[in-house]
Amino acid sequence: MSDRELRSCRRAIRLRRARRRKAVAVSAAAAAVFCVVLTAAIFLSTIRTSASSGFKYYTGVTVEAGESLWEMAERYIDYSIYQDKNSYLAEVKRINHLDEDGAVFAGQLLVFPYYSTEYIE
């Protein structure tokens, strides 16, 4: 192989490597853009879903003498979100680390979830 052919071969190899580097860079950029667009779409979809069903908030309530968990739940339950009062009470018990019987006493502070269509920062 002559010097001229060797230089030509090396030049062709350099050109192929440069093209390959460009192709990898373009592919990486396209993948990054795709990930950003996908993440934004998922995030916006979640916000729209939350906004349509209402935003979930929590409020602290002090138990008054003679009140039961069942009665207190009636003030905050949203039947469009929860199937029935038992499913709502199960969440309240889980949040407040209550036993299955859900016994509460006067002066106890409980946290109740509720939904509102208003967005509060």
Image: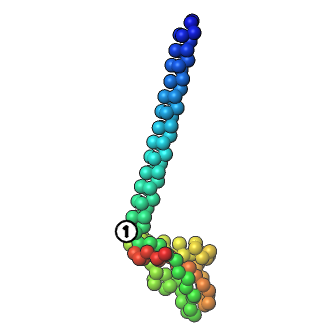
At x 49%, y 33%, the residue is: 22
Residue at numbered disc 1: 52
Residue 86 horizontal/vertical position (percent)? 48, 74
Q: Secondary structure at mark 1?
A: helix
3 or 52: which is nearer to us?
3
Q: Residues within 10 Å of mark 1 (few under 14, many from 20)?
A: few
> Residue placed farthest to the front in the image?
4
87 and 18: which is toward the camera: 18
Pinpoint residue 18: horizontal percent, then vertical percent.
52, 28
Which residue is pictured at 54% across the width and 76% down the height? 92
Q: Is residue 45 above or below residue 114?
A: above
Residue positioned 45% across, 84% down in the render: 75
Vertical placement of residue 7 versus 117, above or below: above
Residue 11 in sight from this viewpoint:
yes
Residue shown at 57%/88% (left/top)?
A: 63
Q: Is residue 23 left or right of residue 95?
A: left
Question: Nearest the camera: 102 or 7?
Answer: 7
Q: Amino acid at mark 1?
A: Ser
Quarter of the image where the N terminus is located: top right
Quadrant in the rendering for residue 96: bottom right
Q: Position of residue 105 (x, y in %)?
A: 61, 87
